[in-house]
Amino acid sequence: MSAHPRLSLNQATIKYAPFHEALRLTVAGGYESIGLWREPVAAVGLDEAARRLADSGLRVSSLCRGGFFTLPEGAERRAAIDENRRAIDETAALAAAGAPGSAAVLVLVAGGIPAGSTDLAGARARVADALAELAPDAASAGVTLAIEPLHPMYASDRAVVSTLEQALDLAEPFDAAAVGVVVDTFHIWWDPEAFAQIARAGASGRIASYQVCDWATPLPADVLLARHYPGDGVIDFAAFTEAVEAAGYTGDIEVEIFNQGIWDAPWPEVVERTAASFDRVVAPHLAASVTA
């Protein structure tokens, strides 16, 4: 079995698989790359995770996640900043352990509006402040902080950064190697400015990750679990993939799915269906070259 050489299986797609099983299933599915999450890495320990990753022969496409730093100044905010510094170090270690072509990319989810507040603008400003603190650490470690805009339905509790334009505005004060953005189809498919902002991101070299999954209605009661296999919803993957390609992105492409039905399905079936859906609706719009 062989998957497309630029396809990366984001670990969240097989959420319940332990770390070693996620690696084994990814390799068995013919993938060359995996997107990792900090919690499964922590469950086995960073050193052991790095060893197992190295043994697997897989590239790392990203580590998820940092962020959640919209709190006002105080002990909780300091703890969040320190946790992001640890995440930067983990990203560097895992990228070093991965196969050649691994990306030292830490995905950032900004965080929502602090409890008891209605100050959306203030929460976004604190994201900028956090980036100013963390960008030097990222640059020193050779890590790219990748700001991921989330769909506006998550603005209150998960991410006050809702559009690619907002993410790029936050990234612009910093070197592109230290702060970039994530282009995730699920989150930005609705945005009429999305394609112009993808081109802007490409022109400044800030596309750190491209993630694909689909949007379909009705949404579940828990809207966090609303993602679908590419091709099972309404997103125009041809247009998005061609735009990201035209913007110069040549890295791995992650399929990241949060969906209870998919999480409950047999893991090998999910791995196979993920590759098949990617081959059907994403791969035809990619250049022939593999990861640069």
Image (cartoon, helix red, strand yellow):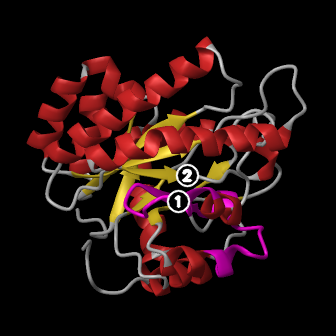
Q: Which element type, helix, strand or loop, lies under badge 1?
A: strand
Give the residues drawn in magenta, as a range. Answer: 170-197
Tag of residue 181: 1
**84 or 46: which is nearer to us?**
84
Q: Which residue is drawn at the image coordinates 75% and 37% (left, top)?
A: 123
Q: Position of residue 150 (x, y in %)?
A: 68, 50
| Residue that mark 2 sits on | 147
The answer to the question of whether label 1 and label 2 lie on touching residues, with beta carbons closer than 8 A, is yes
- Mark 1 neighbour class, 10 Å CA radius: few under 14, some 14 to 19, many 20 or more: many
Q: Position of residue 236 (x, y in %)?
A: 65, 77
| Residue at (71, 24) in percent of width and height | 72
The residue lying furthest to the top in this view is: 75
Q: Disc 2 marks which amino acid?
A: Ile
Locate the C terminus and report the quarter of the image it occupies. Answer: bottom left
**Nearer-the-camera pick, 208 or 188:** 208
How far, Cα to Cα, is label 1 from label 2?
5 Å
